């Protein structure tokens, strides 16, 4: 009897495990179905958006309708006879077709008949290119938003309630700032790291969602949680390399020492090139932040005993390179004083690095 009771308990436990396994499979299948339906809805939305844009830039022609002519229509008896011989509808029948499709809209007629013609005046190369790059532009703006949210969260002692609104405000003028930074008379090798940082594409800092191997650690000893998802680990590595790492803090301390007293340097100031103080020239702040971002990355491979000296030399190297690219008496010098932080002017209105170690 005791063995029979044990067998019944074992069978009941097995049935319970099978039920739980079946329930888990059903939940996974439901989750997969939900994801597929969401993807289908997103694809349908993108198709409808593309059709709406096409409707604004195209005129529709039926199977036998010619392109809209600029001059008055001319009758051609030979063409009329040829249409009748070929079994094609004449102009009166074509007008009837036009009346039938009137009010339906170009997209409906395109779906029904399969004929769409584009106006050369409206459907320009610029608009076609914009259509083709719409998905990439949306992805780029999403990466900017994620970068801004990460910078806001880094500056908060407690988790930020919802950084999205503040992030939207910060990236509103980011396209203009990117264009202006790219127009600076300076080598692109200094600017590239900022472009990659905004798009989360810096190699070795979680760029492109590629995190370090599990169990790997930073040169300072910091190690990301192995149990976190790959995307989370990649985001944490960007935050560490360009802010919380002690080697990055060495470069940030130099920036803080050269600012007016009481000025705090936050991640949004460095990552989005937003001046922390109105007394600092905007373009000078752009330059010194680009130098600092390059220094943070290069300091990871320097001797730990000389980090302060290395950081100062790397910042000076960038400032001197920028100075050499500007030539004599650049336009920026007219808006700087002799004691301006980071970059100042001499008696001859030439740019000179002004950096306090």
Image (cartoon, grey):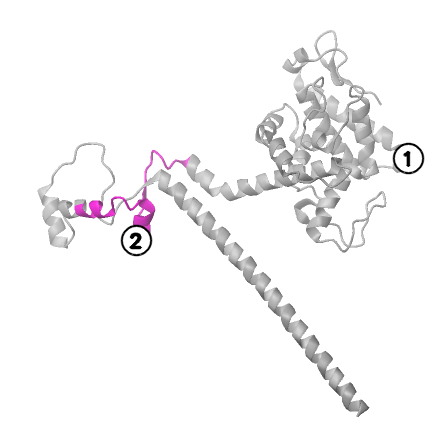
Q: In which quarter of the image is the C terminus?
A: top right
The vertical placement of 332 against 289, above or below, is above
Is residue 329 visible from the viewing direction of this image? no
Across and down, in percent, residue 295 comes to 77, 32
- Residue 263 — which label? none
Q: Earlier in the sequence, mark 1 or mark 2?
A: 2
Q: Where is residue 159 in the image (x, y as percent from the top left)?
A: 73, 41
Residue 217 position within the rendered picture, expressed as x and y whole percent measured from the top left: 82, 48
Q: How far apart are marks 1 and 2 (CA)?
A: 74 Å
Which image quarter is the N terminus in? bottom right
Q: Residues within 10 Å of mark 2 (few under 14, many from 20)?
A: few
Mark identifier at residue 305:
1
Whether residue 250 sits left or right of residue 177 in the image: it is right
Disc assigned to residue 112: 2
Q: Quadrant of residue 86?
A: bottom left
Residue at 75% x, 36% y: name it: 156
The answer to whether marks 1 and 2 mark residues whose Cβ atoms lie closer than 8 Å is: no
Badge 1 density bin: few <14, some 14–19, many ≥20, Cα 10 Å: few
Specify whether residue 296 is painted magenta: no
Give x and y (percent) for residue 351: 72, 15
Q: What stretch is highlighted in magenta?
A: 96-125
Q: Which of the pair 185/59 is nearer the observer?
A: 59
Image point (70%, 52%), residue name: 230
């Amino acid at each position: 009897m005791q063995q029979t009771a044990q067998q019944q308990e074992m069978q009941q436990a097995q049935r319970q495990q099978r039920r739980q396994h079946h329930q888990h499979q059903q939940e996974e299948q439901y989750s997969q179905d939900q994801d597929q339906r969401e993807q289908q809805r997103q694809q349908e939305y993108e198709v409808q958006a593309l059709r709406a844009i096409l409707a604004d830039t195209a005129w529709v022609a039926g199977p036998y309708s010619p392109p809209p002519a600029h001059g008055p229509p001319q009758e051609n008896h030979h063409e009329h006879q040829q249409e009748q011989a070929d079994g094609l509808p004449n102009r009166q029948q074509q007008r009837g077709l036009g009346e039938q499709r009137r009010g339906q809209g170009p997209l409906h007629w395109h779906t029904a008949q399969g004929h769409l013609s584009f106006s050369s005046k409206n459907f320009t190369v610029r608009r076609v290119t914009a259509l083709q790059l719409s998905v990439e532009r949306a992805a780029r703006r999403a990466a900017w938003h994620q970068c801004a949210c990460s910078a806001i969260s880094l500056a908060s002692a407690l988790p930020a309630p919802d950084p999205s609104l503040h992030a939207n405000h910060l990236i509103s003028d980011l396209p203009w700032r990117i264009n202006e930074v790219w127009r600076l008379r300076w080598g692109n090798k200094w600017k590239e790291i900022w472009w990659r940082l905004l798009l989360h594409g810096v190699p070795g800092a979680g760029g492109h969602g590629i995190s370090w191997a599990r169990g790997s650690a930073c040169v300072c000893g910091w190690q990301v949680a192995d149990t976190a998802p790959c995307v989370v680990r990649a985001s944490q590595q960007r935050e560490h390399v360009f802010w919380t790492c002690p080697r990055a803090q060495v470069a940030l301390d130099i920036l803080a020492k050269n600012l007016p007293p009481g000025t705090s340097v936050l991640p949004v100031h460095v990552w989005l090139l937003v001046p922390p103080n109105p007394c600092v020239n905007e373009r000078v702040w752009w330059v010194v932040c680009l130098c600092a971002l390059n220094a943070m990355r290069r300091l990871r491979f320097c001797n730990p005993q000389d980090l302060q000296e290395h950081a100062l030399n790397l910042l000076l190297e960038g400032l001197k390179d920028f100075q050499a690219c500007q030539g004599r008496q650049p336009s920026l010098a007219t808006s700087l004083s002799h004691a301006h932080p980071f970059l100042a002017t001499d008696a001859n209105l030439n740019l000179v690095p002004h950096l306090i170690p």
